[in-house]
């Protein structure tokens, strides 16, 4: 096993021998209410307001040109987006950022900031 900064590299054999850190039995025993309560109490999981959640997450104009960029993201962020299966992770990242931009535009318009 080698370590560079916060990156840990393991061989496939080492990965097979590693135990999961998830206590699946404990999670399975939790009620939906307890899961919801814990999620609401998690400081890394701030609640989103209804206006943001009601945003149009699916509508993107396929004719709109995409601009290639290079961006450095935390590996946790990239891994999370890559786990989805509906479309590519870059498309999902773009949809989230587009929803955020549209939400901010609406907020500014309502606040009279134009």
Image (tube, grey):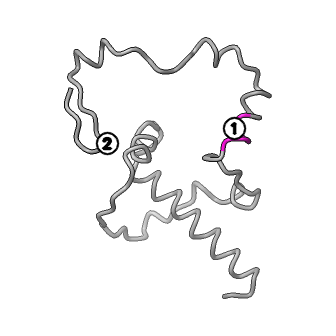
The answer to which quarter of the image holds residue 11 is top left
Q: Which residue is mark 2?
A: 6
Magenta-drawn segment? 38-42
Q: Nearer the viewer, residue 92 or 6?
A: 6
Of circles 2 and 1, the one toward us is 2
Q: Is residue 9 left or right of residue 47?
A: left
Helix, strand, or loop for circle 2?
loop
Q: Residue at x 53, y 57 (%)?
A: 96
Q: Label 2: few (<14), some or many (≥20) within 10 Å?
A: few
Name the spot of residue 55 as percent of width and height, x first.
67, 60
For marks 2 and 1, the one nearer the N-term is 2
Q: Residue at x 58, y 64 (%)?
A: 100
Q: Nearer the viewer, residue 59 or 85?
A: 85
Q: Is residue 71 above or below residue 9?
A: below
Q: Which image quarter is the C terminus in?
A: bottom right
Q: Which residue is mark 1?
A: 39
Q: Nearer the viewer, residue 91 or 112?
A: 112
Q: Main secondary structure of the magenta part?
A: helix
Q: Is residue 83 magenta?
A: no
Q: Is residue 93 left or right of residue 16?
A: right
Name the spot of residue 36 as percent of width and height, x first.
75, 34
Q: Residue at x 33, y 58 (%)?
A: 72
């Amino acid at each position: 096993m080698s370590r560079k900064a916060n990156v840990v590299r393991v061989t496939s054999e080492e990965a097979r021998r590693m135990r999961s850190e998830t206590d699946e039995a404990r999670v399975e025993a939790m009620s939906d209410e307890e899961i919801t309560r814990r999620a609401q109490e998690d400081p890394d999981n701030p609640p989103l307001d209804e206006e943001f959640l009601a945003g149009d997450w699916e509508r993107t104009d396929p004719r709109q040109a995409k601009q290639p960029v290079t961006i450095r993201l935390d590996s946790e962020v990239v891994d999370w987006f890559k786990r989805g299966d509906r479309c590519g992770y870059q498309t999902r990242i773009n949809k989230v950022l587009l929803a955020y931009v549209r939400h901010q535009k609406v907020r500014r318009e309502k606040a009279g900031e134009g």
